[in-house]
Image (cartoon, rainbow, N blue to C red):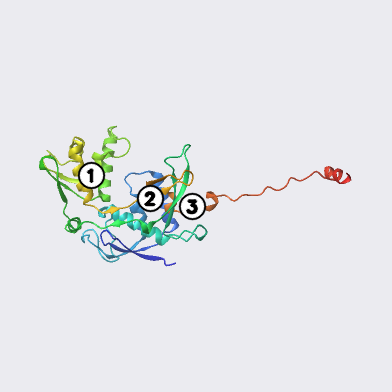
Amino acid sequence: MPKTAIITSPITGLKMKIRRWKLRDMEHLAELADAADDGVDILSEAVKPCWIETLDAGIYPAEYVKVGTASAPDWSQLLKTDVLYSVFGVRIASWPDDSERGMTPEHYQFDVECKYCQPKYSFQQQVRLTQLKFLPLPKASAEAIGARRPLECRGPDGKLIKFELPKLAQDRDLVEFRNKKAAKGKAKGKAKPSELLAAQTTFIEGLKTQSMTDRVRFFAELDLADLVPIRNEMSKAGSYVAQNVDCKCPKCNATFAVKLPLQANFFMPSDPMEESPPEIEEAPEEQDPEEQDEEESH
């Protein structure tokens, strides 16, 4: 099995040479996950140590991605979909064959809970990572990334809204904003839709300031009829990743779709002894010698 592989993103054309995962990489990811630090993106951390060389920057400007081995890409400026595709590529390159269960390095098996069974019933679902569809960006979006300029749409009353496609740098800004709220006892649970939209936005016409707080307030105060067209325009400007997996419950035969979960065994093969421990035959009980002599005398 080759120790390096070439990953070419169908989204942006980014082409990289990578190495396979090592155990120390998995141990590092486990430490990051245990730390539960929202400021650390686990997916990018899964790719960073494996990068060897950038063969083609694709649509990314040279400020963010340089061809060659001298400088790794600026991961914070990569599209999230590119990072996810790269993680899949590293995983496929790193994974062993599991011929006993008919699984190739492309296969990923995860636990699913049936939405219909009562009481709850869980089963294992397989999917081939190469069958998930990563669609390329619209031409206007690719050109905007290459020119380092934001995309544009119109809000209520024709107000200009400038935004960028989802990338890791926005997560960092969002975490910083929520940490400030948490210090005031206000941030709880997951990020709100208004916060996610505000992090992706760089300019909203008519705001007194362009602070994150004002952008969040703008989206939070929109009527649903005004918000949905904005959200849809921002979504259609990006690339599409088909992460829904069709499942069929072996118990009740119900069919339903789930979003692909990246469980622990996506990064580290599970121990087959833990999955299905072998049945151990109990040794027959030893008979008392006196009882045995007594049986034989009869």
Disc on res. 245 = 2
Label 3 crowd (10 A; few <14 / some 14-19 / many >=20): few
Q: In which quarter of the image is residue 113?
A: top left
Q: Is mark 1 on a helix, strand or loop?
A: helix
Upstream in sequence: badge 3 or badge 2: 2
* 61 shown above or below 159: below
Which of label 3 and label 2 is nearer to you?
A: 2
Query: Which element is circle 3 on?
Result: loop
In this orientation, does residue 262 appear? no
**x and y percent of residue 94 in the render?**
42, 60
Q: How far apart are marks 1 and 3 (CA)?
A: 37 Å
Expressed as whole percent of the image width and height from the top left, the position of residue 64 reads 23, 58
What amino acid is found at the position of numbered circle 2 in the picture? Val
Q: Mark 3 points at which residue?
A: 270
Label 2: how many Cα within 10 Å (few below 14, some 14–19, many 20+)? some
- Numbered disc 2: secondary structure: strand
Residue at horizontal 17 percent and vertical 41 percent from the top: 211
Q: Nearer the viewer, residue 178 or 241?
A: 241
